[in-house]
Amino acid sequence: MSEAFPPQATHGREIDLLTQVFATVIEGRTALYVSSPLTTGPRAFEWHLRNGGHSQGAFSAYAPDFHREVIEPNREATAGFVRYLRDKTNAVVIDPTALEDLPGWSQDDYRVFWGRVIERLADRVVFREGWQYSSGCAYEFLVAYTSGARLLRENLVPLTVEEGRSLIRDAVNETRDRGASSQFLSRVHEALRKPARPKVRP
């Protein structure tokens, strides 16, 4: 699991091209983005505990049982929620968990890419339950906040930056208590002290 902060992409040209593709169907910052754990988060946390801890040697995001027990359930749960949002709203709803693995991409590449999508195309970001345990979601919270997107809970109630920071702080403490690395979450927590841009207008 990458702990580099801020994340550094190695597939910058591909990220630029994919962001441009999204922009061909989304006008300005009008999309609703769903931030949901995929390879990290509560299910992954419990998987690590059952399978020898959080060391690199004990973990592979491509292990068949990790896909079956973590990635697939996370994708299915998010897909159901996204269908609900698409029925409820008139917005384009972006589900990052629906994107299949891209050859050679690292976690940092995905973090940079989805951060770019939020900055350019999302006026609202919905954070699903348990998001604070996910390094990727925590980074998306930071990007959404600093770029002026509206922050929402899963029930679509506004989520303040203070509430988000508190959730991340609690996740950092719990992660440390369980003997896992919390470096990335801690860096996000500190970065949230910076002021945000003005909110994106509807």
Image (cartoon, rainbow, N blue to C red):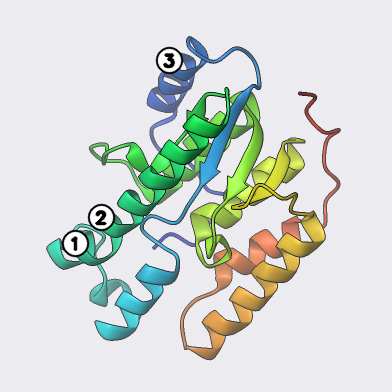
Three-letter amino acid code at the position of disc 2: Glu
> Mark 3–mark 1 contact, CB under 8 Å?
no
Q: Is residue 3 above or below residue 12?
A: below
Q: Pointer 1: residues within 10 angstroms few (<14), some, or many (20+)? A: few
| Residue drawn where x is 27% and y is 37% of the image | 102
- Location of residue 143 in the rendering, given as x and y in whole percent from the top left corner: 66, 43
150 to the left or right of 5: right
Mark 2 / mark 3, whichever is N-terminal: 3
Instruction: From the image, tell me which residue sits under label 3.
Output: 21
Q: Is residue 176 above or below residue 31?
A: below
Three-letter amino acid code at the position of disc 1: Arg
- Location of residue 184 in the rendering, given as x and y in whole percent from the top left corner: 56, 64
Three-letter amino acid code at the position of disc 3: Val
Instruction: From the image, tell me which residue sits under label 1.
Output: 68
SS for dot 1: helix
Mark 3 / mark 1, whichever is N-terminal: 3
SS for dot 2: helix
